[in-house]
Amino acid sequence: MKKVGIVMGSDSDLPVIQKAVDILRELEVPYEVHIYSAHRTPEEAKSFAASAREKGFGVMIAAAGMAAHLAGAVAANTTLPVIGIPCKGPVFDGMDALLSTVQMPSGIPVASVAVNGGANAALLAAQILAVEDSALAAKLDAKRAADAAKVLAKDRDIAASL
């Protein structure tokens, strides 16, 4: 199975990345996590992205706040799918990161999830990998069914209590 490469711009993004890691572990998808800054360690970020395909990665996740250039920097150096996670920052509540992540120039696409959307980034990464992996697709189907069952159980509980 291909791996998911995860890069965060700072350790302050770790709570968001932890949600992604938890989902990938649940689905038994291999991953690797690094802290590389688009601005403070651009050569390391570039090297990781440029060598990702040859190192067995199938999709990349990049999380960053504020200017949020990391996903774009990763996408500029690989043709693997890149999923950007805009992270909530102290000034604009994550809207700055969201706009930076989704406003990529033509030719360098970055998929984006919601602000702090680590879980959905992992699920999207798994769905991309599952295009060629029927066992992973089955795990995703089972997760969706289990998630639906939890909602329906809560519905029954609410209906019974009200």
Image (tube, rainbow, N blue to C red):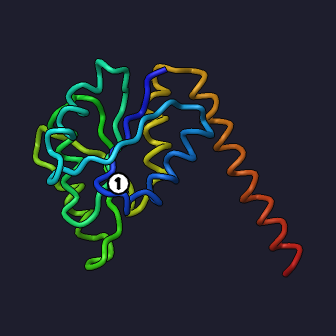
From what the image shows, is residue 149 above or below residue 100? above
Tag 1, which secondary structure? strand
Up the image or down, 48 lies above or below 134; here it is: below
How many marks can you see? Answer: 1
Which residue occupies the extreme right position in the image?
160
In this rendering, the answer to whether 17 lies above or below 116 is above
Q: Which residue is drawn at 25% across and 64% down?
A: 97
Q: Which of 24 and 137 is in front in this view?
A: 24
Residue 79, x across and y down, in percent: 22, 29
Mark 1 surroundings within 10 Å by alpha-carbon count, few (fewer than 14), some (14 through 19), many (20 or more): many
- Depth check: give the residue in front, 151 or 71: 71
Horizontal and vertical percent position of residue 21: 51, 45
Q: Quadrant of residue 116?
A: bottom left
Task: Name the residue at 29% across, 57% down.
Answer: 64
Quickly name the residue at label 1: 85
Q: Which residue is drawn at 30% across and 39% down?
A: 82
